[in-house]
Every structure is written in structure tokens, then in C-alpha cells.
Amino acid sequence: MPRSLHVRVDRRLLHAEARSRRHLRVDVVAPRRQRRAGLSLGLVLDCSGSMAGAKLNLAREGAIRAVQALRLDDQMSVVAYSDEVQVLIRSGAADEPARRVAEQRLRQLEAGGNTDLCGGWLRGCEQVGLGLEGRRLGRCLLLTDGLANLGITDRRTIVGHAAELRSRGVTTSTLGVGRDFDEVLLREMAEAGGGNFYFAEGASQLADFIAGETGEAIRVVARDAALVLDLPEGASLTSPNPFRVRTEQTRSVVELGDLVEDQVLSLVVTVEIPAGTAGERVAAQCWLWDPGGVLEGSAELEFRYADQGEYRAEARDRDVDREVVEAYAAAARRHAAELAREGRAEKGREVLAKLAAEVRRHAGDDPPLLALAGELEKEAARLAQMDSLEYKRLEFATFGTLRSKGEDGMTLGTVGFTSRTLNLMMQAHLSGPDRTAVRVAAVTADKESTRLVESAGQALTAADARAFAYSVVDGGARILDSGPGVALSRDDELGLAYAMATTGDAVKVAFVRGLLEDGAAAHWHAKESAAIVSLSAWNEAAAAPAEAFVACEMVLQGLRQRCPGWDPSVPSHPDARKCWGDSGDGPAGIEGKIRAGDLCPSCRQFFGAAGIDVPGLVSLVARVRELAESPAAMRS
């Protein structure tokens, strides 16, 4: 399984005479699920008078869509509340008769009365809890457009209930609608309850949010995940992200909650380390944990104490710097808004202005950080003029920033993470002469793909180490790959090509298990200098072994770097010469190239004119044929 944990640190030196703060950027990548766990879903709908009309109509449609997405082994319940709490559907199996009854009762629901928010929500959680047998995941979604004005209304009490229910296996997500709900209450309930917070500015968003939350609950792959860090003696840990942190002596545990398959959760961790002796080294260990053992990954971070001159001279990782400042800025914006809502706008303005000044001092000539400082200054100046709608937008935006959610409130897309990770990993792994005939950065989807690439790459390197250089990023394509024999969507293919586009000068080749839409063995994306190659397409159609196919594609796609405009899918000459230029890129054409194992005089002249070491290239082409003829010998 590809590792789930990726950690970067801003600096590696510690001040020998004072405490040092080191900032860690942590990315947690959830794996693709093997099988879906059962779900106990509770929908809790506000049907007070203010929900009348489009709000209630669209909430009904979203609830019906959510119910229809469930399986027979799931449990479902529906609760409606206003002055009174009604259990429309008691917890039970989500079979077809139950879904029909749920739809009928939802369509009969009418609006009227006040808002016993806590009473309705607690009843919904009770129903969810009744369906937790068999290790089902418990998820309660609370929808409201107003304030809690009946029953329990104290914020701290309600949030405390959310945390307690989470410890009992019931997660709470919240959805606020319009201008009049308490966004701080709903956001804090979601954070304490381990769920999501959504803001529907208009009624038209309701159905998609409800259905989307249900879709995410269905896709949970790791429950109660945690990031564990063993720190040096005397060190302490904090984070701007809203995850609970538990500390016992030198061990800190950051509770991440449930993770959805293929989710990328990014957070910032700040470790403060006491002074030491110049030259001394200390280390921090970090790893992922979840009760089901789904997540894998660990990292050891080594730091060295230095005197003041060396400490100040050390360069910082600017990418980490920016991400750290953005996280702390999001937390500061949230805090400033809370102060303003409490009538202390001047104090909130001071929070933002102070952070803006610190960012400017820290930024130097870094344009993104200077731009962020300017944004904070503008926000500080107009904080007192913010209205209720702007507060809600800010709460939703900062929740998304600090919990790795997209603008639609759903889990963060993976292209940006994939691009950043591939860039780092490829730069770290690519080796060999800079001016080789073929230079390839390969990205794989699973361990078997990695084995094939390593086998082919080692064989090619053995043929002529001056002619070929390669790297392989194990599992880097997994997030966007569709899986063996399953069609890879055009969007995912383009996303993978785009993600690889920033990874240096080498040609990038992603070996995926999914099938390309047109059934081709490979697609070339010229702008990104990247090829997407389907191993499934070759395995289904070819006679030559997979190692030979992989080696052939690495050479063919790698040649594009030195021969702009050359297209291996087009025959180089009309007549057959038992040469790699004889045929195109269909299965039969690739098979012909593999079996030919040579270059004709005109092709040698063409590649020589491009500055390629022709004898080295001929050695590579011959080795591909040898792989086809004697794969067992080449692997030994």
C-alpha cells in the first residue's frame, strides 16, 4: 500500500540558546476502500415556520436523494422538529419499502412553529445510535435556518453533547441555511462532533449538500484516525487546525476523525523545542493510527542545534512557510470575527492587524505572503462593518481551509496534492546523467506496477547507464487511477497529467490500471510533457510480457523530450524495415516495435540529428526485444 503520510518541515536547525518553533506541513492521504462499511444515517430537519416554501421543498428533495443512496444493510432514520420533535422514520433497515415510506412522509412534512434545535438533534442522534450494531458508522446531519430558541439553548452545553456523542460512535454534521442561524454554534457542533459544517446561502444548495454529506459518509474508509508524534524531551505541540490534541509526557496525539476514501487532509503542526547544545541532534517521530489499521505511514524528523549565526543563515522552505501562514491566518480570521460578533470589533481588528504586521516582517520579498498581509490589513479595516451574511461566509470558508474542504464543502480534490507530492518525490528520486538519450520519471498506481517499472528500468539501465535514467514514484497515480479494467475518466486522466506537469524536465509517464476511454494503450499530453499508459489495455491484448511493454513505453515516451514534434504513434516510413519506425502505437504496432529490436539507417540518422547517442539508443531498443524473448532471464 502506498504510504498515507507525507511530512515537510520549514527548517531543520534549532537555536542552541533559546526555544525554537518548527512548523510541520502534514498531508494524510486516505486509501481507496476495499469494501464499504455499513452506515446508520439520521437526518434531522428543521420544519419551523421560517423553513416554509423553497427551503423545505429542497430539503425534502435532498433527504429523499440521501435515503435512495443507502444499501439494504444500512440503517436510516428521519426526525423533524419545530416546537415539537417528530420521529418520521424510526431507525431501521434501509430497504425499498422503508425508503418508499420515508419519501411519502417527507413529502407530507409542513412548516410551522419555533426551533427546538437541540431537542430535535438529540432525538436524531438517539435514532442513529440504535442502528450502530455490526460496526456501522453513525452519522447525524442536522439542518436548520434559525436559532435554538426552545429547549436547551446554551452553546457550551450543546457542543459538549456533540463531543460526548462522538465518543459513543455518533458523528454530527451541520447544515445552516440563509442569514439567521447561529454559524458559530453549528461550526462548533460539527468540530466537536467530528463531522462537517455546511453553509447554504440559498435554498438551491440544500439538496446537493444533503446528498453530498450522505455520499461522503458512505465513503468513509478510516474511522477515528489520529496523527501520533513522539517529541524530544521538553517539547510541546500546537496546531491552528481545529483538531483535538491530547498530550501525555512526550507523546502528542492529534485526533483527525473519520477519513473518506482518497481524501487528502492537510494540517499544520507547530513543535516548540527547548534549547540544547550546538551540534547535538534530536528527532521527532510521527505516524498514523486508526483502530482498523487502514492507514500506513511514518516519518522521522531529525533536527540539529546550531549557534545563532548558522541558525539565522539557514534557508526556509518557502512552500511550507506559505501554507503555515495561511493556516494561522484562517484561525485568526475566525477569532477576529467571533470578537466582532461579541461587540469587541476593535479587539478583533487588533488581532488581524498584528498578524498582518508579523506576516510582513516574515515575508521578505515573497509575493504570496505580502499579498496575504495586504488582505489581512483590508479585513481588519472593515471588520466592524461585516454583516451576518459575511460572518457566515467567513465561518464556512475558514472551516474549509482548516479542514481541507473545497468551496463546495466536500473533501478536498487531490490534484493539487498529487502535483506537490510528485514534484517533491520525483526530484528526490530521479538520478542519472542529465543528458541521457532517455530520461523518464515514472509514476505507478500499485505495488505490481512499481515492480514492472523497476524491472524494466533496471534492465534498460543495465543495457547502457549513459543512455537511460529513470525514477519511480510508488503509488503516486493511485489517487486518480480508476482501478484494474475500469474506464479512467477523461477528467481524472487530465488531472493526473496536470499534476505531473510541474515535476521537472524529465518526461513523465504514469502507469495506471484503468482503461483509457478510447481503449488505447497510451495517451500523450504534450503541454504537460506527460504520458498516461494503461497496463490493463496491454494485459488484455498483448502477447509480449508486460515488462517488455513497460520498457518500450518508457523509451518511446522518453524520446519525446529530445525530439519535439516526433510522434511514435505515426510510422516513420511507409515500408516495413523491421525497425521501431515501422508501425504506430496500437497493440499490434507496439508488439511490432518490441519484436523488431532495431533501428533502420534513416531512423538512426534522425535520432542522431536530434543529438541522441544512437549506439546507446540501439542498446535500449535491443534490450526491449530481449525482455520480450527472455523475461525470466532478465528479471533474475
Image: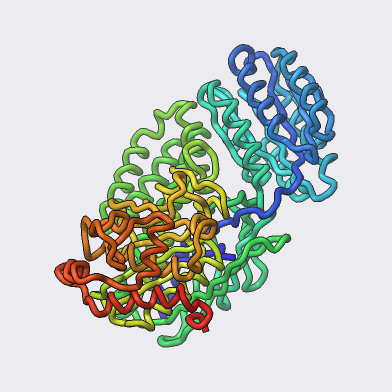
Seen from the viewer's position, the closer of residues 78 and 93 is 93
Viewed as shown, does residue 74 lie left or right of 519? right
Query: How many numbered circles does the render carry?
Result: 0
Residue at 51% x, 57% y is 541
Viewed as shown, does residue 145 lie left or right of 552? right
* Residue 429 percent coordinates (x, y): 40, 73
Seen from the viewer's position, the closer of residues 129 and 303 is 129
| 61 vs 324: above or below | above
Quadrant of residue 34 within the rendered picture: bottom right
Quadrant of residue 448 within the rendered picture: bottom right
Residue at 54% x, 31% y is 199
- Residue 335 visible: no
Residue at 39% x, 28% y is 385
State which quarter of the image contains the N terminus: bottom right
Seen from the viewer's position, the closer of residues 391 and 440 is 440
* Residue 91 percent coordinates (x, y): 83, 33
Residue at 60% x, 51% y is 261
